[in-house]
Image (cartoon, rainbow, N blue to C red):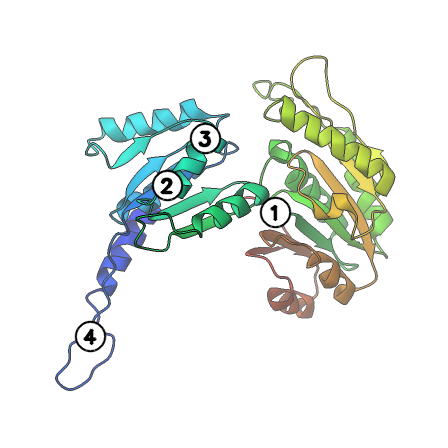
Amino acid sequence: IDFMEYYARQALELKDRGQQTLVRLPGEDNHLEYIPLGVGVVIPPWNFALAIVVGMVTSAMVTGNTVILKPASQTPVIAYKFYELLVEAGLPAGVVNFLPGRPDVIGDYLVDHKLTRFISFTGSRAVGLRIHERSSKVAPGQIWMKRLVAEMGGKDAIVVLDDADVELAAQNIVASAFSFSGQKCSACSRAIIHEAVYDEVLNRVVDITKGLKVGDVRDASNYTGPVIDEKALNKVMEYVEIGKREGKLVAGGKPAGDEGFFVEPTIFADVDPDARIMQEEVFGPFVAFTKVRDFDHAMEVANNTEYGLTGSVFTRNREYIERARTEFHVGNLYFNRKCTGA
């Protein structure tokens, strides 16, 4: 509901801009009018199977576009239930169209089609870059360049400086790394800690993590649930093996339980900033710790990534906060709180 209201209000703002005079020149009346683009392809992820679908569809719809919704293969039913609600609410036929299918069949077809005007995508870097490449090519009969809006994951970092509240930082690293079993683009998968407090922060995070229970989330005593499927479980375990070569395993590193796709919250310590587990998105309950000398070194390590979605800095130093605003290159930047939950 919040997503729908937000985008509806944004649409009203765009409409109002068309009534404003851009430049006042004698004998001229200058306005900028926004018009719908046309047919948009919406390709959402599975991890927030309702919220992100609602936001992506609504933003396209309220600005006058028609939508082809190709849901994630893992969560088509939830997307369909949202589609049913739109129909029940009286949305005219053909405004939003539900089309599930395999990404390499349906997805490629929609991205390549000459009548597709824009693509809105949230998902992995690899798939996003594939869509970017394919959508940049002009199909026979296509009379425009397609537009692409893409959010392609993260390798998000929490920086803890030597003057930080250690307990606050540790609690928020755990929450950012392991809530939703780390299956968020905004999840903390890199902990960048000042050398003066490195051991204290690491030990506290390990202590908290070892007390977490993993299991069926219908049982409130369980902190987090499974990863989405067997493929995701295998991917996490592959990165555990990589991590054993690149750092020191200090917590987790194994499947949890005998059934289902549960993974123990996993922590690696003493990892080089250029290591694979510090560079590649795992998308599971997995965080790597590295040590830095000072604020400048922390910013260097934090920005040493192909991603730039979220980040957080724990410090009491106002100068560092102000510097991080411009030097920490992420879209969502937080101070003294977790890097998730925008």
Going from N to C along the chain, the mark reached first, 2 or 3, is 2
Going 60% across and 35% down the picture, which residue do you hit?
A: 183
Q: Position of residue 88 (x, y in %)?
A: 23, 26
Q: Would residue 289 be found to the left or right of residue 226 on screen?
A: right
Q: Which of marks 4 and 1 precedes in the sequence?
A: 4
Q: Disc 1 versus disc 3: distance between alpha carbons?
A: 26 Å
Residue 293's disc is none
Mark 3 vs 4, N-terminal side = 4
The N terminus is located in which quarter? top left
Which residue was labeled with disc 4? 30
* Residue furthest out toward the bottom: 26
Which residue position is annotated with label 1?
Answer: 154
Taking depth in this image into account, of 295 and 58 the one nearest to the observer is 58
Q: Which residue is mark 2?
A: 41
Q: Amino acid at mark 1?
A: Gly
Viewer-nearest of discs 2 and 1: 2
> Residues under labels 2 and 1: Cα distance?
23 Å
Q: Earlier in the sequence, mark 2 or mark 1?
A: 2
